[in-house]
C-alpha cells in the first residue's frame, strides 16, 4: 500500500509560495487517513459480527432441531425385555363405555426348540408329550434328531406348562415371550370384538393382529404404539350386554329358534349400547370360518345383526305411514279402505290369515298390520318418493357400524322398482336389510325425525344427521307404535313403567334356491321406549322361532319376538338408568310403589 | 516462571483427566441405573396389566351371576327390575328415639291381669 505523506513537499512548497498555511494540508491529510482507518475497522467489526451471527444461528438451529426431534419423536415406553424387539408390542386395550375391560393383553410364552443345543432329544420329546398330549412323539423325535435348527412347538403356553417344560431341563427347549389378546368376559360381545391372531412372528415377539370385529376395523389405532396407554372406548355397556345375552339366549331356547339377534341403540347419539347375535363364540378361541358350500348363517361367526340381511316384514309399515304423514297426504286418523281384493298386475295383495279389516284409520292399519292399507298408502306416496325416503334412512347401503362385518351387510333391493315393489316394500317384502338398518330407521322416528348413524364408539352428546321427516310425522308414528303395543299385534310387549312402542314383523324365510319356506320365518320386533320421550330403540330378531300356545304352533312375531323383547326391556331399562314412569295422561290415584 | 506454568498445566491436565474418568464411570452407572429402572417399570406395567386382566376376569358378569346365585340365601340378589324403583317420599324417616323413662313403675306386683287397675285391663 502506498502511504500518502502527511506533508507532501510539492504541495507544501506550492502553498508557501502562495502564502497559505501548509499545516492545513497536513490536517486535511490526517483527516483523510483517519477516515480510511475508520472504514477499515468498521468493515472488520462487521465481519466479526457476521461470523458471530452465523455461529449463533448454527447453535440455535441445532438446539431447535433437537427440540423438534424430541417433540416429534414418539415417547418410548419402557419394556420388560429391553432387547429392542422390532415387532411392535402392546396393543391398546378395548374398554366399554364405563371403562370396564373388554379386551386386554396378556403375557404368555411360546415354546420352541433348537435341536443342536439338545442333550437328549428322545427324553425331551417324551417329556413334552407328557405335558402336551396332542403332540406326536415320533414326529418330535424325528424333528429333534434331524437337521433342523429351529422348531416351533407351541405358540402359546400357560405358566404351569412353562414350569413343567422347565422341569424337563433340556437346554434345547426355549421360550419366547408372547403377547396374547385376552377377552376376560368370554363370549360377551363376541361379535363386536371379533378376535385377534398372530401376524408376523419372531422369537422374541409376535405381532397381534385383529381378525374380525372392532379388532380388525381399528387395527391401525390399536397397534399404534402412541395409543398404548389410550384404550379404545366402545359404546357398549358391559352389564346391559350381559343381561341382553342372558335374556336373548333364554328366549331363543324357549322359542326353539335357530338364532337370535338384538340391537339396543341410543336414539340421540346412535351409540349401540348392546348388540348380540346368537349363537355366539368365544373370541379367546375363535372358531375357524366355515368352508364354502355351507350356509354362512349356521356358523356362530355369522353376525346376524349386521350380516343377517333378510326381508324383515311388517316392521317396515311404519315407514310408509310416517312418510305419508310427513308428506301431508294423511294423518293418523285418516280413514283408508283396506278391503280386498287388491291386485297389482297379476299379484294379489292379501292380509295375514285372509282377514278383512274394512275401512279403518291409518293408526289402525299399523295396529292391525294391514298389508293392503300400507300398500295403498305406498301407492299414494309413489315409488320415487318412497325410494328417496328409504335411502335417506340408510336402507340401501351397508350400515356405517364400525365393525368389518358391517360392510358385508349390503341390503338387497329390487332391480326395477315398479308399482308392485312399491307396495310390497311398504310392508317389508322385496327389500332385505339387516336389523341394524332397522334400528337406525326406528331411531329416526324415535328422536323426532333425524337420521342417526349407528356407531360402536362412545360419543359425546347427540349426533344428529340430516332431518328425514318432520317432528309431527315422527310424533304421530310414535303414537301409532305405542298403540300397536297397547291394543295391537304386540300386546305382549307391554312393560309396566316403560311405555314400549313397537311394530312386529314376521317374514317367511327365503329358500336358497328361490321361493319361500312355509314353516320357517324371521320374526322381528322393532321397539322404542319410553314412547313419550324415546331414549332407546331395541330390535329383536328370532330366526325360525316357533312356540306351542293355545294348542297351536305359533310363529308370528307377536308370539315369539315380542315376549322376548318385553323381557329384555324389563331387564335392561333399569340398568340403563331409566326410571319407570307413568304414561302421560294416565289417571291419577295410581302410584308406583316399591314392593 | 515458565516451568511453573508447565507444571501447573500438567497438573491441570492430570486433574481434568481424573475428573473425566470419574464422570465417565458415573455416567455409565447412571445409564445402567436408568436401564434397571426402566426394566422395573416395564415389569411393573406387565404385572399391572395382568392384575387388571385378572380383575376383569374375576368380575366378568357370568361369574358374578353365579356367585349371586350361590349366595342367594345370604344376599338375596335378584336382577334389577322396574318395581324395585321407589320414590324418595316413600322412604320412612328414622323414628324419634323413645322418651327416657323418668319415673319407672314397678310392675313386679302385677302378677296377673286381675290385679291390674280396671282401666288397664285388656
Image (spheres, rainbow, N blue to C red):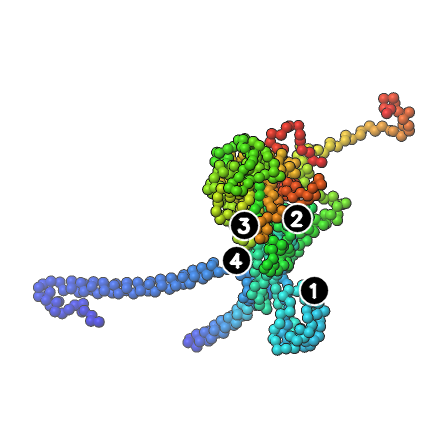
Which of the two discs, 3 and 2, sits closer to the camera?
Answer: 2
Measure the alpha-carbon separation of dots 4 and 3: 17 Å
Callout 4: chain: A
Measure the alpha-carbon separation of dots 1 and 2: 41 Å
Q: Mark 4 vs mark 3: same chain?
A: yes
Q: Is residue A29 above or below residue A526?
A: below
Measure the alpha-carbon separation of dots 3 and 1: 41 Å
Measure the alpha-carbon separation of dots 4 and 1: 33 Å
Q: Is residue B10 left or right of residue A78?
A: left
Pick the quarter of the image with the N terminus of chain A.
bottom left
Q: Position of residue A61 (x, y in %)?
A: 40, 61
Q: Position of residue A564 (x, y in %)?
A: 65, 43
SS class of the residue under badge 3? Answer: loop
Q: Check if mark 4's residue and mark 3's residue have beta carbons within 8 Å.
A: no
Which of the two discs, 4 and 1, sits closer to the camera?
Answer: 4
Determine which residue is flagged by label 3.
Answer: A401
Q: Check if mark 3's residue and mark 2's residue have beta carbons within 8 Å.
A: no
Callout 3: chain: A
Q: Mark 4 vs mark 1: same chain?
A: yes
Determine which residue is flagged by label 1.
Answer: A160
Callout 2: chain: A
Residue occupying the point 60% across, 31% down: A584
Tell me where residue A369 sits by quadrant: top right
Q: What crowding class fits label 1: few (fewer than 14 Cα within 10 Å), some (14-19), or many (20 or more)?
A: few
Determine which residue is flagged by label 2.
Answer: A257
Which labelled disc corresponds to residue A220? 4
Callout 1: chain: A
Q: Position of residue A34 (x, y in %)?
A: 23, 64
Amino acid at each position: 500500500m502506498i502511504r500518502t505523506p502527511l506533508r507532501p513537499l510539492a504541495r507544501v512548497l506550492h502553498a508557501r509560495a502562495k502564502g497559505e498555511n501548509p499545516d492545513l494540508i497536513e490536517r486535511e491529510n490526517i483527516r483523510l487517513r483517519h477516515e480510511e482507518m475508520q472504514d477499515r475497522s468498521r468493515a472488520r467489526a462487521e465481519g466479526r459480527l457476521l461470523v458471530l451471527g452465523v455461529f449463533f444461528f448454527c447453535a440455535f438451529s441445532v438446539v431447535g432441531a433437537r427440540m423438534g426431534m424430541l417433540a416429534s419423536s414418539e415417547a418410548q415406553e419402557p419394556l420388560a425385555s429391553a432387547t429392542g424387539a422390532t415387532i411392535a408390542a402392546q396393543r391398546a386395550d378395548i374398554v366399554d363405555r364405563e371403562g370396564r375391560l373388554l379386551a386386554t393383553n396378556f403375557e404368555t410364552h411360546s415354546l420352541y426348540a433348537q435341536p443342536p443345543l439338545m442333550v437328549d432329544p428322545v427324553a425331551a420329546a417324551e417329556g413334552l408329550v407328557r405335558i402336551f398330549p396332542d403332540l406326536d412323539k415320533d414326529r418330535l423325535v424325528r424333528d429333534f434328531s434331524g437337521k433342523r435348527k429351529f422348531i416351533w412347538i407351541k405358540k402359546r403356553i400357560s405358566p404351569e406348562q412353562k414350569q413343567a417344560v422347565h422341569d424337563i431341563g433340556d437346554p434345547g427347549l426355549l421360550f419366547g415371550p408372547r403377547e396374547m389378546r385376552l377377552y376376560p368376559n368370554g363370549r360377551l360381545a363376541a361379535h363386536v370384538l371379533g378376535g385377534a391372531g398372530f401376524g408376523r412372528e419372531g422369537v422374541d415377539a409376535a405381532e397381534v393382529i385383529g381378525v374380525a370385529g372392532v379388532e380388525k376395523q381399528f387395527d391401525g389405532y390399536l397397534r399404534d404404539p402412541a395409543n398404548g396407554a389410550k384404550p379404545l372406548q366402545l359404546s357398549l355397556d358391559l352389564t346391559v350386554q350381559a343381561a341382553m345375552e342372558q335374556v336373548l339366549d333364554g328366549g331363543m331356547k324357549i322359542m326353539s329358534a335357530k338364532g337370535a339377534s338384538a340391537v339396543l341403540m341410543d336414539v340421540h347419539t346412535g351409540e349401540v349400547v348392546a348388540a348380540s347375535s346368537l349363537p355366539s363364540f368365544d373370541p379367546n378361541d375363535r372358531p375357524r370360518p366355515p368352508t364354502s358350500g355351507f350356509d354362512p348363517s349356521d356358523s356362530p361367526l355369522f353376525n346376524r345383526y349386521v350380516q343377517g340381511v333378510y326381508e324383515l316384514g311388517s316392521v317396515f309399515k311404519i315407514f310408509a305411514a310416517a312418510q305419508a304423514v310427513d308428506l301431508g297426504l294423511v294423518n293418523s286418523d285418516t280413514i283408508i279402505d283396506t278391503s280386498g281384493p287388491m291386485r297389482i298386475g297379476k299379484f294379489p295383495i292379501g292380509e295375514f290369515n285372509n282377514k278383512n279389516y274394512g275401512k279403518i284409520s291409518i293408526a289402525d292399519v299399523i295396529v292391525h298390520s294391514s298389508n293392503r292399507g300400507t300398500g295403498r298408502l305406498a301407492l299414494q306416496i309413489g315409488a320415487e318418493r318412497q325410494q328417496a325416503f328409504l335411502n335417506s334412512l340408510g336402507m340401501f347401503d351397508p350400515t356405517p357400524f364400525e365393525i368389518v362385518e358391517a360392510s358385508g351387510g349390503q341390503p338387497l333391493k329390487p332391480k326395477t322398482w315398479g308399482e308392485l315393489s312399491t307396495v310390497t316394500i311398504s310392508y317389508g317384502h322385496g327389500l332385505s336389510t339387516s336389523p341394524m338398518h332397522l334400528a337406525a330407521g326406528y331411531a329416526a322416528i324415535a328422536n323426532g325425525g333425524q337420521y342417526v348413524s349407528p356407531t360402536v364408539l362412545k360419543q359425546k352428546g347427540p349426533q344428529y344427521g340430516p332431518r328425514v321427516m318432520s317432528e309431527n310425522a315422527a310424533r304421530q308414528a310414535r303414537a301409532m307404535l305405542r298403540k300397536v303395543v297397547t291394543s295391537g299385534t304386540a300386546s305382549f310387549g307391554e312393560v309396566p313403567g316403560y311405555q314400549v312402542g313397537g311394530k312386529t314383523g314376521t317374514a317367511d324365510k327365503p329358500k336358497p334356491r328361490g321361493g319361500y319356506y312355509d314353516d320357517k320365518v324371521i320374526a322381528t320386533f322393532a321397539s322404542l321406549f319410553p314412547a313419550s320421550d324415546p331414549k332407546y330403540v331395541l330390535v329383536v330378531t328370532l330366526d325360525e322361532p316357533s312356540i306351542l300356545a293355545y294348542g297351536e304352533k305359533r310363529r308370528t312375531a307377536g308370539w315369539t319376538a315380542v315376549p322376548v323383547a318385553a323381557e329384555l326391556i324389563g331387564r335392561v331399562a333399569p340398568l340403563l338408568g331409566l326410571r319407570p314412569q307413568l304414561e302421560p295422561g294416565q289417571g291419577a290415584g295410581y302410584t308406583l310403589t316399591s314392593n | 516462571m515458565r516451568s511453573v506454568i508447565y507444571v501447573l498445566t500438567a497438573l491441570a491436565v492430570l486433574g481434568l483427566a481424573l475428573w473425566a474418568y470419574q464422570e465417565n464411570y458415573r455416567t455409565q452407572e447412571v445409564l445402567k441405573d436408568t436401564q434397571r429402572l426402566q426394566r422395573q417399570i416395564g415389569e411393573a406395567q406387565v404385572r399391572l396389566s395382568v392384575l387388571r386382566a385378572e380383575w376383569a376376569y374375576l368380575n366378568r358378569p357370568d361369574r358374578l351371576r353365579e356367585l349371586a346365585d350361590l349366595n342367594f340365601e345370604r344376599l338375596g340378589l335378584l336382577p334389577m327390575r322396574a318395581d324395585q324403583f321407589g320414590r324418595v317420599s316413600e322412604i320412612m324417616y328414622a323414628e324419634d328415639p323413645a322418651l327416657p323413662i323418668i319415673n319407672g313403675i314397678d310392675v313386679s306386683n302385677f302378677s296377673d291381669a286381675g290385679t291390674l287397675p280396671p282401666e288397664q285391663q285388656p
